[in-house]
Image (tube, grey):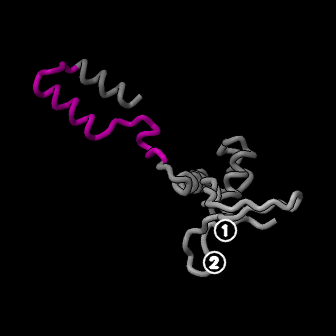
Amino acid sequence: MNIIPNKCPICGGEVTVTRIYCRECDTTIEGHFAGHPFTHLKPEQLAFVETFIRCEGRIKRMEEELNLSYPTIRKQLQDVIRALGYEPPSEEAEAGAITEERRKRILEDLEKGRIDYQQAMRLLQESEA
C-alpha cells in the first residue's frame, strides 16, 4: 500500500487529497480532505513514534531498543512534537525551574520591603519545586 505524500514530488508544495475511491463498491468521493497531523511527519519520525508507543513512552526502553542516548531520543521526540505543530516545554519549565523574571520580582519585593527574608526564601524554593 502506498502512503499519501504530503509534499508534491515535482515542486515540493503541500498536497491536498481531493478524491477517494473504494474498490469494493466502486464509489468515488471528491472534495478537499484534510490530512491527519501525522501525515506531516517524515518516515523516520513515524518510525520513532511507533517505537515510542511500542515502548509505552519509556525513554529508557527506547535507549536500549534504538541504542541511542537519552539526549538524542529527547531531541527526536521534540522534533516530532514540533512537526505536529506544538512547542515542547523548555527543560527549565519542565523541571519547574524558576524563571529569571520571577526571581527578579521576588528579590525586588524583598528589597522594597514588601516581603521579608523568610517569605522570599519560601517563594524562591516553591518556584524551584
Which residue is found at the position 55% from the left and 51% from the top?
Answer: 81
Which residue is found at the position 60% from the left and 68% from the top?
Answer: 15
Question: Would you say residue 104 sits in the magenta stretch?
Answer: yes
Magenta segment main secondary structure: helix
- On the image, the x and y values in percent for residue 116 come to 18, 19
Q: Is residue 105 above or below residue 54?
A: above
Q: Is residue 71 visible?
A: no
- On the image, the x and y values in percent for residue 21 come to 78, 62
Highlighted magenta segment, given as a residue range: 88-117
- Which element type, helix, strand or loop, lies under badge 1? loop
| Residue positioned most to the left | 112
Which residue is found at the position 12% from the left and 28% from the top?
Answer: 111
Mark sitting on residue 9: 2
Question: Would you say residue 54 sits in the magenta stretch?
Answer: no
For label 2, the crowd category at 10 Å Cα-Cα, with few meaning under 14, some 14 to 19 and many 20 or more, is few
Amino acid identity at mark 1:
Pro
Q: Nearer the viewer, residue 82 or 76?
A: 82
- On the image, the x and y values in percent for residue 54 come to 75, 46
Mark sitting on residue 106: none
**Horizontal side of residue 126 vs 88, given as left or right:** left
> What residue sits right under mark 1 in the picture?
5
For label 1, the crowd category at 10 Å Cα-Cα, with few meaning under 14, some 14 to 19 and many 20 or more, is some
- Quadrant for residue 4, please give it: bottom right
Q: Is residue 121 above or below residue 54?
A: above
Q: Evaluate if marks 2 and 1 touch, with contact meaning CB atoms under 8 Å apart.
A: yes
